[in-house]
Image (cartoon, rainbow, N blue to C red):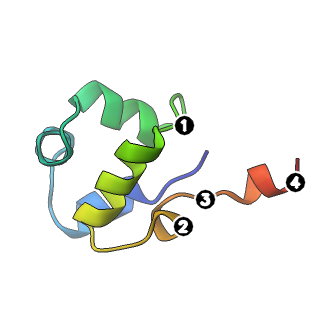
Amino acid sequence: MQTKIRALRKERKLSQEELAEAVGTTRQTITSIEVGKYTASLPLAYKIAHYFGLTIEEVFDFSELEQL
């Protein structure tokens, strides 16, 4: 699943560690989500989107799921 997390972090000059601490997860989890190796749980996706002041749909690309 594609996300805009990396771009959002860079816009705000945040490290993966800083974002991870803010949303209650690990830097490794943020890395895995950014590179598409891990899909965030719904609660984590909500926390990440809320942190950036966006909706889940604005941060995560669900288009590949719509094709199923």
> Which quadrant would residue 55 be assigned to in this image?
bottom left
* Of pointers 3 and 4, the one earlier in the residue sequence: 3
| Viewer-nearest of discs 3 and 1 | 3
Q: What residue do we see at 54% from left, 67% from top?
A: 57
Read off the residue under disc 3.
Answer: 61
Q: What residue do we see at 33% from left, 29% from top?
A: 29
Mark 2: few/some/many CA within 10 Å (<14, 14-19, 20+): few
Report how far apart the C-alphas of labels 1 and 4 lie in the structure: 18 Å
**Furthest-right residue in this view:** 68
Report how far apart the C-alphas of labels 4 and 2 lie in the structure: 16 Å
Residue 19: where, in percent of width, then height? 18, 48
- SS label for mark 2: helix
Read off the residue under disc 1.
Answer: 36
**Which kind of residue does numbered mark 2 sit on?**
Glu
| Viewer-nearest of discs 2 and 3 | 2
* Of pointers 2 and 1, the one earlier in the residue sequence: 1
| Viewer-nearest of discs 1 and 4 | 4
**Which kind of residue does numbered mark 1 sit on?**
Gly
Seen from the viewer's position, the closer of residues 13 and 43 is: 43
Q: What residue do we see at 49% from left, 71% from top?
A: 58
Tell whether label 1 touches label 2 (CB within 8 Å). no
**Which kind of residue does numbered mark 4 sit on?**
Gln
Read off the residue under disc 4.
Answer: 67
Q: In the picture shown, does residue 25 fall above or below 9?
A: above
Read off the residue under disc 2.
Answer: 57
* Of pointers 1 and 4, the one earlier in the residue sequence: 1
| Viewer-nearest of discs 2 and 1 | 2
